[in-house]
Image (cartoon, helix red, strand yellow):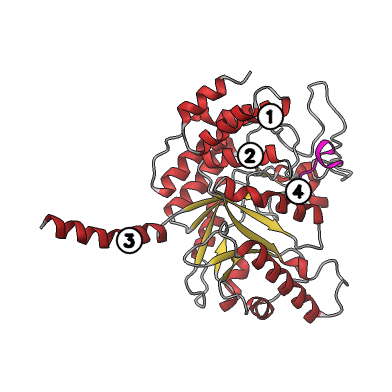
């Protein structure tokens, strides 16, 4: 009898495991790859601002020792280059420790903002090394911008299709690409309102990519019929008409997001959005006017996390890890320290149904590791071992190694 029971359990185990995989909940952080420094890349990118209302020049150093950056709070690392391997290690270790499983990256294609594309290509080899997943956010303007690049609308559609094909071959077909409900989700950012691809055009662009599921902002999702495969929540922190940025307004925006429907969507994928706040005054609203949505001492972040948990979203997207220009970052800084990582760690565990077993003090070790690498304060073998122990969640050993760093 005992043998029969064991045999039965042996056959049932794969079913249980398959169920666990299907029910897996992942947390992604929206991640930008566009920061450059003179020290690493020979020029500044995105830490500076040329807008007359809010100019910033990183070459200026204040008496405090901080540079003049286009940010609302100062990164604990100082300005960094997103192609720097030491920075990538620091960021991915912190993400893993704070409950983040992967990154969602804006991609403008290969023609526009090439330095951002190059930054993403630099990050790719580290995804598998640090067991991180990738989901792409396709900036559709790669098919039609700048205006006049292509002779007609059909050529613009073909340009977008070609970029999607390249993206599929280089990113989406790889083992590190995220899967949700058996599909490869691709978020779509619509940028230039009078050039947006319409539902029929998107159906044409994506018709040959059967494994891809397009995820749109809620307004497009409502109207895009079968071209849409789901919806994502994006910031939703303020009303541009009234400047209302209260927590009640945020609740109402989220309520509208979840009540929005598209009866033609099958196997729908819903990306919740966890937003700490918003402040793009350092770049003056990218040339319009500065916009703010207060963090309310972390209450906005907690609110959007709790709603995402209560609504059982398919994917939780933190908005963002490191968009310093718009003040949405949770990456450690002088103003908030590790507060948002500690909160994210707690809520991620609840969302996934697991224990939060990472001590808060462990979050401080990756910065110590980064500084030691930059200042040659320890043997490389020790630093590599420390990184590996953090990856394996061997916190006692990691703490011991950390103590050996000056």
Q: Look at mark 1 in the image and give the residue it sits on.
A: 373
Which residue is outermost to the left?
A: 1
Quarter-of-image position of residue 356: top left
Residue 257 to residue 74: above or below: below
Circle 4 SS class: loop
Label 1, label 3: how far apart the Cα atoms are: 43 Å
Task: Give the mark, 4 or 3, whose residue is nearer the N terminus.
Answer: 3
Circle 2 packing at 10 Å, graded few (<14), some (14-19), many (20+), is many
Is the C-beta separation of discs 2 and 1 under 8 Å? yes
Residue 294 seen in the current view:
no
Magenta region: which residues?
34-42
At x 44%, y 56%, the residue is 311
Q: Is residue 169 left or right of residue 312?
A: right
* SS under mark 1: helix
Q: Relative to 169, does residue 402 appear above or below in the rendering?
A: above
Q: Is residue 140 above or below residue 35?
A: below
| Sequence-first tag of 1 and 3 | 3
Q: Which residue is mark 2?
A: 89
N-term mark: 2 or 4: 4
Q: Disc number at residue 14? A: 3
Residue 66 position within the rendered picture, expressed as x and y whole percent measured from the top left: 78, 27
| Dot 1 alpha-carbon crowd within 10 angstroms: few under 14, some 14 to 19, many 20 or more | some
What number is the disc on residue 34? 4
Q: Position of residue 324 (x, y in %)?
A: 71, 42
């Amino acid at each position: 009898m005992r043998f029969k029971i064991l045999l039965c359990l042996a056959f049932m185990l794969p079913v249980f495991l398959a169920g666990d995989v299907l029910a897996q909940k992942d947390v992604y952080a929206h991640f930008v790859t566009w920061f450059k420094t003179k020290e690493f890349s020979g020029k500044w990118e995105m830490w500076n601002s040329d807008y007359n209302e809010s100019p910033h020049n990183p070459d200026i150093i204040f008496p405090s020792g901080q540079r003049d950056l286009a940010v609302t709070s100062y990164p604990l690392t100082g300005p960094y280059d997103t192609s720097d391997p030491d920075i990538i290690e620091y960021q991915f270790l912190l993400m893993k420790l704070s409950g983040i499983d992967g990154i969602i990256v804006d991609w403008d294609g290969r023609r526009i903002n090439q330095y951002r594309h190059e930054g993403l290509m630099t990050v790719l080899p580290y995804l598998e090394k640090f067991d991180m997943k990738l989901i792409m956010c396709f900036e559709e303007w790669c098919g039609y911008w700048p205006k006049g690049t292509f002779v007609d609308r059909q050529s613009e559609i073909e340009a977008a299709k070609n970029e999607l094909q390249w993206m599929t071959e280089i990113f989406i077909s790889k083992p590190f690409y995220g899967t949700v409900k058996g599909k490869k989700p691709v978020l779509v950012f619509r940028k230039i309102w009078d050039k947006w691809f319409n539902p029929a055009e998107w159906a044409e662009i994506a018709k040959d990519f059967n494994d891809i599921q397009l995820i749109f902002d809620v307004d497009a999702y409502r109207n895009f019929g079968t071209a849409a495969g789901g919806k994502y929540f994006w910031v939703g922190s303020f009303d541009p008409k009234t400047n209302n940025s209260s927590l009640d307004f945020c609740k109402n925006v989220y309520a509208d997001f979840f009540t929005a429907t598209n009866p033609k969507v099958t196997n729908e994928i819903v990306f919740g959005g966890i937003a700490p706040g918003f402040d793009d005054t350092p770049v003056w609203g990218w040339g319009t006017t500065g916009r703010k949505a207060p963090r309310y001492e972390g209450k906005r972040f907690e609110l959007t996390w709790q709603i995402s948990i209560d609504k059982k979203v398919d994917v939780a997207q933190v908005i963002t890890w490191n968009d310093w220009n718009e003040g949405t970052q949770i990456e450690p800084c002088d103003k908030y320290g590790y507060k948002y990582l500690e909160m994210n760690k707690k809520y991620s565990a609840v969302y996934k149904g697991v224990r939060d077993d990472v001590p808060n003090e462990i979050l401080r070790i990756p910065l110590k590791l980064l500084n030691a690498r930059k200042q040659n304060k320890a043997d490389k073998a020790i630093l590599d071992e420390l990184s590996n122990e953090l990856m394996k969640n061997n916190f006692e050993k990691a703490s011991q190694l950390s103590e050996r760093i000056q």
